[in-house]
Image (spheres, rainbow, N blue to C red):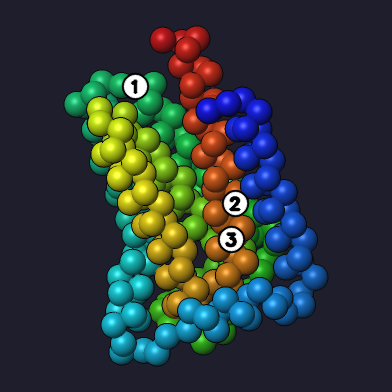
Amino acid sequence: MNKYFWIAMVLLCLLLFFFLMYEIQSEKPLAFDIYIAELFSVGENTFSFTFFKSITYFGKSMFIGFGSLLCVLYLWILKKDYWTMAVFSIGIAGGDALNGWIKNHVKRVRPEDHLIETAGFSFPSAHAMVGLIFFSMVAYLIMNEIKGNSLKWAVGIGFVCLVLLIGVSRIVMKVHFPTDILAGFALGAAYSLTLFKLYEFLESRVL
């Protein structure tokens, strides 16, 4: 990735995140939240509800924690790639800690009338942010093992679609405002891009 393009992408994501944080701290209803929430409103006991309720579990801390453990064991035992294992572990743990710190700082209350049980503050969405970090790292590992460009693109697009669906599922389940999801994606993308760039920089000097 071109250095200037990478810098522009990270800055753009950070600007979007801080803009959204500034907007939600005004504590006024946002037109974007109202419009998107109505757009993705579904009734209970429908196929859409069942589908998105299933999708949302892919972003839960239990799923990501178990998936991270499997990835670490794979890198440790099968690949013996201790450097990547360390970066993966620190990346996931750091992203989760950063999300929790921001939530406790902003203290945005979740939407009312949840369709599933949830707890904690709302901004930014951990499902969106940490989910994006986790699945982008998993996609990175898988794509490094694949030789064909077409298959790499298919894997990449598949993971992008999954992350987007997880974000939408949190809106459908009425446990997050759309701005929580957008902010989670923005900060998660900036974090992941920085992590990958740091990994490449350190790898070229350590290995």
Task: Name the element at disc 2.
Answer: helix
Q: Quadrant of residue 161?
A: bottom left
Q: Residues within 10 Å of mark 3 (few under 14, many from 20)?
A: many
> Whole-percent x and y of residue 19?
74, 57
The residue beneath circle 2 is 186
Answer left or right for 122 relative to 127.
right
> Whole-percent x and y of residue 126?
51, 58
Q: Quadrant of residue 52?
A: bottom left
The residue beneath circle 3 is 182
Q: Earlier in the sequence, mark 1 or mark 3?
A: 1
Task: Name the element at disc 3.
Answer: helix
Eye-nearest disc, 1 or 3: 3
Closest to the observer: 193 or 116?
193
> Whole-percent x and y of residue 8?
67, 37
Q: Which mark is residue 82?
A: 1
Task: Name the element at disc 1.
Answer: helix
Farthest residue, direction right: 26
| Residue type of the residue flagged with mark 1 | Tyr
Residue at point 60%, 49% (across, down): 187
Farthest residue, direction left: 78
- Residue 119 visible in the shown view: yes
Quadrant into which the C terminus falls: top left
3D distance between C-alphas at marks 1 and 2: 29 Å
Eye-nearest disc, 1 or 2: 2
3D distance between C-alphas at marks 1 and 3: 33 Å
| Residue type of the residue flagged with mark 2 | Ala
> Whole-percent x and y of residue 44?
36, 89
3D distance between C-alphas at marks 2 and 3: 6 Å
Vertically, is 91 above or below 83? below
| Residue type of the residue flagged with mark 3 | Leu
Q: Quadrant of residue 62?
A: bottom left
Residue at point 70%, 61% (across, down): 20
